[in-house]
Image (tube, rainbow, N blue to C red):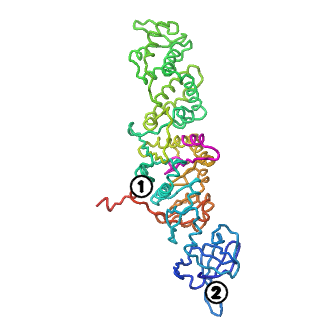
């Protein structure tokens, strides 16, 4: 049951030329009740080679206008097709790769819809359809087993349908597999624009939505374990600490805290001790005194203690600070222990430092640590000052979106973390903290080989994976990218997978793009984006690549290590209540 459309007349390398029969230019053929697509660019045909059918894709057609005689008939031109083998059928199963090449005079025929479906589908991929082949209109199921155990990217200009594709992929997965998934896998969605906080992806009772906001302190918070917060790398991420000077400062702070954390009033004791170290030192440091006064103001101490601190002075040649009494007399604090205790130490002991939050404790301990470092001459203040200012400026915003807890917190099977109402600085830093938290936690708990998986989905990934930012130092940018590069390079062996969606793939680190296994490419028109894909995606053929700038909304080229050949798929639109909250504004309806 075949429709012959031509025969092989030339084979040069892997380029095959066919002489097409006159009947082959029909758009649609019907034969014995079956429908066949006619021959055109990107259509599939089969060349009968012995007992096998070699599957080829049509890459071009042209006319040979030489005046020749063929089978007794004078012809002014011959229609020729340029085709490329992509695989073959054996025992009615499609196998990709060029193992066989046709010979001259081999017959070419059209493929039925069932045969075309077998090219793209695998037996194990049933019931995972997200759309239809754009040209053939055939519904195609994707091999979900070989998609979700890889890193993959979804790219396309704004309005091209990439958010719908991302949502459709995971909606179909959760609809079909949630009961099995819930026991073995976690899915974390980093949602920069609040597109997945309603009924998208899964029903409300199947997912947890964390709406982070720096506008109010009463909103949801991302819970961070106490042991993970008091970590030099975590704090370095939050406050962009430099590696050579500011990170060691944080390590000293954390080490000092760990020594005395078992004491319930360790911070209060630290404050009292610091007063004594500064005011009673035999080698007085005016800088340390000024830092102590600033700390006292931040702590909101009693006015009498602030007044007493303002009366402490330093005179060159003296061996300690002195207190200038109301009558003009001096009292040396290093030797007059009774006066120091009554005036300063007893007041310092009244400072209540219990029950404060993690970020406020961090600021207090940072101020105390820099005071100690200045006293001992172990640091240059101007190198640490920028870190202290960042802590002071950003602690309130971070305290609104991050809570430090001593209790372990389990994540849900599906967790959507919305950053829509966060400030830009927080949007850039917090995803790193979240990704590091889940990566380290999963890596520590997973067995070998992995018995569970973690999937981090980053929409609008150019927000945090861009190489183009000029608003941050090179060292911080390198660290930011290195963290995600480590996850995407090493995470697979631990069962951790990254999904990226972005409007500008060229802005994302090439190292990260090169580690993606599969690609869903919507319309892209920027030359840099297209050049990146051409250099990175080895499975993208020239015909598919040429169609990317002109794809209709919702259509995408699917290619990668999971797929034998690139597919051009029109992704189904989701129902209105399931669509991501990124739809175009209907001006006709709005303005009416």
Quarter containing the C terminus: bottom left
Residue 128 percent across, percent down from the top left: 52, 61
Which span is picked out in magenta? 437-466
- 491 lies above or below 106: above
Which residue occupies the extreme bottom position in the image? Answer: 72
Q: Which secondary structure, mark 1? A: loop
Q: Earlier in the sequence, mark 1 or mark 2?
A: 2
Q: Is residue 439 above or below residue 67?
A: above
443 drawn magenta: yes
Residue 459 is tagged as none
Q: Which residue is mark 1?
A: 582
Which percent across, then down, holds residue 501? 51, 54
Please determine whether, in this image, residue 33 is positioned above or below residue 151: below
Q: Quadrant of the N terminus?
A: bottom right
Give the quarter of the image for residue 118: bottom right
Q: Outermost residue, left direction?
A: 592
- Residue 26 pos. (x, y %): 53, 82
Would residue 54 be seen by someone viewing this image from the given angle? yes
Q: Position of residue 428 (x, y in %)?
A: 49, 43
Residue tagged by mark 2? 66
* Mark 2 Cα shell of 10 Å, populated few (<14), some (14-19), many (≥20): few
Q: Nearer the viewer, residue 105 or 214?
A: 105
Q: Can see residue 162?
A: no
Q: Do the CB atoms of the residues marked 1 and 2 lie less than 8 Å apart?
A: no
Q: Residues within 10 Å of mark 1 (few under 14, many from 20)?
A: some
Residue 457: in magenta span: yes
**How many dots with numbers?**
2
For the residues labelled 1 and 2, the Cα–Cα distance comes to: 56 Å
């Amino acid at each position: 049951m075949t429709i012959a459309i031509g025969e092989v007349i030339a084979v040069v390398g892997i380029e095959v030329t066919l002489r097409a029969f006159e009947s082959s230019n029909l758009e649609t053929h019907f034969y014995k009740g079956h429908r066949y697509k006619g021959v055109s660019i990107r259509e599939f045909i089969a060349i009968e080679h012995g007992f096998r059918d070699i599957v080829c894709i049509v890459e071009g057609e042209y006319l040979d206008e030489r005046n020749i005689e063929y089978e007794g008939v004078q012809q002014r031109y011959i229609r020729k097709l340029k085709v490329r083998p992509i695989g073959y059928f054996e025992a009615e199963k499609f196998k990709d790769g060029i193992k066989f090449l046709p010979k001259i005079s081999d017959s070419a025929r059209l493929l039925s819809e069932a045969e075309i479906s077998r090219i793209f589908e695998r037996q194990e991929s049933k019931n995972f359809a997200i759309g239809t082949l754009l040209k053939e209109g055939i519904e195609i199921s994707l091999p979900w087993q070989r998609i979700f155990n890889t890193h993959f990217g979804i790219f396309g200009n704004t309005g091209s349908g990439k958010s719908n594709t991302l949502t459709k992929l995971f909606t179909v997965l959760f609809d079909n597999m949630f009961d099995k998934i819930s026991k073995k896998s976690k899915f974390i969605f980093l949602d920069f624009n609040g597109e997945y906080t309603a009924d998208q992806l899964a029903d409300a009772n199947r997912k947890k939505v964390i709406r982070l906001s720096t506008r109010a302190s009463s909103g949801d918070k991302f819970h961070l374990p106490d042991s993970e917060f008091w970590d030099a790398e975590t704090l370095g991420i939050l406050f962009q600490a430099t590696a050579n000077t500011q990170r060691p400062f944080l390590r000293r702070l954390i080490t000092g805290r760990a020594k005395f954390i078992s004491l319930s009033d360790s911070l209060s004791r630290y404050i009292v001790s610091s007063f004594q170290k500064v005011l009673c030192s035999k080698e007085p440091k005016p800088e340390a005194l000024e830092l102590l006064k600033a700390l006292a103001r931040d702590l909101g101490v009693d006015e009498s203690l602030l007044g007493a601190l303002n009366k402490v002075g330093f005179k060159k040649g003296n061996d300690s600070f002195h207190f200038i009494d109301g009558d003009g007399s001096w009292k040396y604090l290093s030797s007059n222990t009774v006066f120091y205790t009554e005036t300063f130490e007893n007041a310092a002991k009244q400072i209540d430092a219990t029950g404060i939050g993690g970020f406020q404790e961090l600021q207090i301990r940072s101020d105390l640590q820099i005071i100690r470092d200045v006293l001992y001459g172990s640091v240059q203040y101007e190198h640490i000052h920028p870190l202290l200012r960042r802590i002071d400026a950003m602690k309130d915003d971070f305290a609104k979106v991050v809570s430090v807890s001593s209790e372990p917190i389990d994540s849900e099977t599906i967790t959507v973390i919305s950053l829509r109402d966060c400030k830009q600085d927080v949007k850039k830093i917090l995803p790193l903290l979240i990704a590091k938290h889940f990566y380290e936690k999963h890596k520590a708990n997973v067995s070998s080989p992995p018995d569970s998986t973690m999937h981090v989905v980053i929409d609008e990934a150019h927000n945090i994976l861009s190489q183009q930012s000029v608003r941050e130092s090179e060292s911080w940018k390198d660290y930011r990218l290195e963290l995600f590069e480590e996850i995407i390079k090493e995470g697979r062996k631990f069962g951790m997978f990254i999904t990226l969606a972005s409007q500008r793939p060229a802005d994302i680190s090439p190292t990260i793009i090169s580690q993606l296994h599969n690609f869903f490419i919507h319309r892209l028109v920027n030359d840099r984006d297209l050049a990146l894909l051409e250099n990175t995606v080895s499975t993208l053929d020239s015909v598919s690549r040429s169609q990317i700038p002109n794809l209709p909304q919702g259509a995408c080229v699917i290619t990668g290590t999971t797929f034998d050949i690139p597919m051009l798929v029109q992704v189904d639109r989701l129902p209105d209540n399931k669509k991501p909250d990124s739809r175009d504004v209907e001006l006709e309806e709005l303005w009416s």
